[in-house]
Amino acid sequence: MPHYVVKVIQKDGWLRLPVVANFPDENAAVEAVRLMVDDDDQIEIKGIRSDVMTAAFGDIPEGAAVFRSDWTWRGENDDVAEPY
């Protein structure tokens, strides 16, 4: 099953905690994350190899999307506000 790393950007530019997900396809992962965030939040999603996901984050059960409080998005764009 494909694994994904998901970035959620709130309408005011703040970044939510990263999400890791394990779903059959990208659309299913986006739909699951959409249920956990505001309707006007922007979602960016990238596939990640299953072996890399497991090594980095442990086992993510099929059909799960999990916010990761142990790391944040940093260093990509200094103009984007960050809550930390």
Image (tube, grey):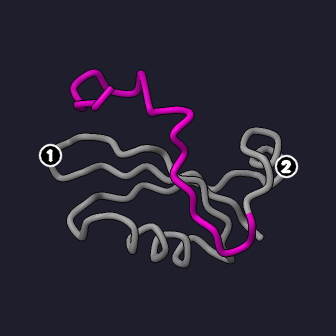
Q: Amino acid at mark 1?
A: Asp
Q: Is residue 49 above or below residue 62?
A: above
22 in the magenta segment: no
- Residue 21 on image: x %, y %: 61, 61
Q: Establish if 57 lies above or below 82.
A: below
Which of 77 and 39 lies nearest the eye of the viewer?
A: 39
Left or right relative to 24: residue 73:
left
Within 10 angstroms of label 1, few (less than 14), some, or many (20 or more) residues? few
User: What span is colored magenta in the figure?
Assistant: 61-84
The residue that appears at 43% across and 44% down in the rendered structure is 17
Quadrant where the N terminus sits is: bottom right
Secondary structure at numbered mark 2: helix
Give the residue pinned by disc 1: 12
Q: Earlier in the sequence, mark 1 or mark 2?
A: 1
Rendered residue at 33%/64% (across/down): 37
* Farthest-out residue, left: 12
Inter-mark Cα distance, 1 to 2: 35 Å
Q: Position of residue 78 (x, y in %)?
A: 28, 21
Total numbered circles:
2
Q: Identify the residue at horizontal 73%, vertical 59% (top origin).
A: 60
Amino acid at the residue labelled 2: Asp
Q: Which mark is residue 51?
A: 2
**Which quadrant holds residue 64?**
bottom right
Residue 47 higher or lower than 80, as above or below:
below
On the picture, is 80 further left or further right than 52?
left
Which SS class for mark 1?
A: loop
Percent from the top left, x then y, of residue 61?
A: 75, 67
Crowdedness near tag 2: few (<14), some (14–19) or many (≥20) residues, C-alpha within 10 Å: few
Q: Main secondary structure of the magenta part?
A: loop
